[in-house]
Amino acid sequence: MINGDQVRKEGQDVFHSLVYKLTRKLGEGSMMPPNADILVTMKMFEEPNESSESYNTPSFCAEHTSDDPLAKSLYELMPFGLRQAVSTMTLGEKAWIWVHSDAAYGDTGLRYGDHPSDVILPGTNLLYEIRLVWWRPKHLSVIWEETDKKNDSLQSTAITTIEKTLTEMNEPYGLCKVRQAYRRLQHMLSQLRSVRIDSKHKPEQEAERNRVMYNIIKRSANYAIMLGRYGHALFHLKHLLEVNPDDASGHCLLAQAYFSMGRSTNAFYSIRNAHFIDPLNKQYTAVQKEIQQYISLVDDVDADDFVEEEEYEKYAEMLKRRLEIKRKFVLKSVSVKLLVLLESGTKKITVKGGFPAEILDQAHDWLKEKHSETLEVTRTEKTVEIKPILRPNSDESQQET
């Protein structure tokens, strides 16, 4: 049985301790080019939370068998962590792959089917049992390998075109535009990664690509924060700061991502790094002070020596506003999801999953007030159950009678 601990202990670190691959059966031949077409069979599992009683037993999610294999271009394979691991495989190789949530679907999760249970929850690590059946280079790969002269021309043109596109991109307004821009940037990253360069013989070209990729990754992180995809932002920024640890604005963005996720201590250290690198930047100083005061408010209510009473009340009010905004957002999201499921024909819905009692109480009260004539709403100790009220003249009622 596949085991995440074993993959991490015995496997190969494919990507910055976020992706590990443990080869179960060796393949043959060479590794594929970045833009190859692939055919794989695989099983996908969710790694349970450490607090779960079944921590050592991954839960099965989906499968592509030999009768229904997965055929894709390598650069289209998702999530990113799986793509990184598969790119290191050879023909016929079988492997176990562990992907951290930051290299999978982060804090947004994923719906991969039509059934309500076909969802990967935010912050979930993934495990894969996978076999590479075959791969073949696309026509572009063959062209690139024909002559060095043509190769140079294609690489140079591709990098120049992508950089020009990046420069001409306007700053998006509204979540829809930001989402479109983020997807466009990810596509540009895939295009850059597919450009094959011999770094030993063409260091200038390799440096040019890395520079363009750096700018795209930084912009991607900013858009990810705007979209609330903080796990994606962390993934981009960790890679960014490994390349250039002295990027003060990168540390500031990392602090914003951590702070939005509630990881205030991590946010403080990140913004402090930004302040050390650029001590004259007033923005970093102001953000560092705000995070310091927030930590003092949350972790030490008696820290009168840290903030004056007036400031303490000010930040207490700020904390209440943030919690209220978050509570309303969760309540609205849950309520809308319930109505969508009911309209789709779902007979009974149970709201659970660790929501605070206050959220469950308010969801119960809101549904009873707004939909008392059409829904039967029941509040238990840890859940809220919702069922449509069957009318005497409804088809379902007649069938049951």
Image (spheres, rainbow, N blue to C red):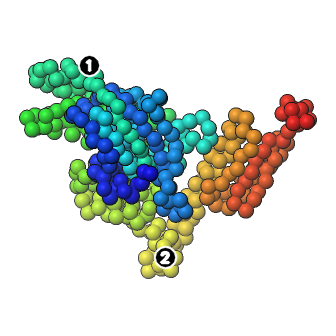
First of labels 1, 2 by sequence position: 1
Q: Position of residue 391 (x, y in %)?
A: 88, 36
Left or right: 206 as drawn, with respect to 165? left
Residue type, mark 1 in image: His
Which residue is rendered at x = 35% and y = 31% of the image? 133
Residue 236 seen in render: no
Q: Which of 350 and 153 is in front in this view?
A: 350
Residue 278 lies in quadrant = bottom left
Q: Where is residue 33 in the image (x, y as percent from the top left)?
A: 24, 31
Q: In which quadrant will I find the C terminus?
A: top right
Which residue is rendered at x = 62% and y = 41% of the image? 116
Q: Mark 1 points at which residue?
A: 139
Which residue is rendered at x = 25% and y = 32% of the image? 32
Q: Nearer the viewer, residue 399 or 160?
A: 399
Q: Residues within 10 Å of mark 1 (few under 14, many from 20)?
A: few
Left or right: 275 as drawn, with respect to 42? left
Look at the picture and state if 382 lies above or below 112: below
Q: Nearer the viewer, mark 1 or mark 2?
A: 1
Q: Nearer the viewer, residue 362 or 275?
A: 362
Q: Which of 125 and 374 is in front in this view?
A: 125
Look at the picture and state if 20 lies above or below 206: below
Q: Name the residue under label 2.
A: 300
Q: Residues within 10 Å of mark 2 (few under 14, many from 20)?
A: few
Residue 206 seen in render: yes
Which residue is rendered at x = 16% and y = 39% of the image? 207
Q: How far apart are marks 1 and 2 (CA)?
A: 63 Å
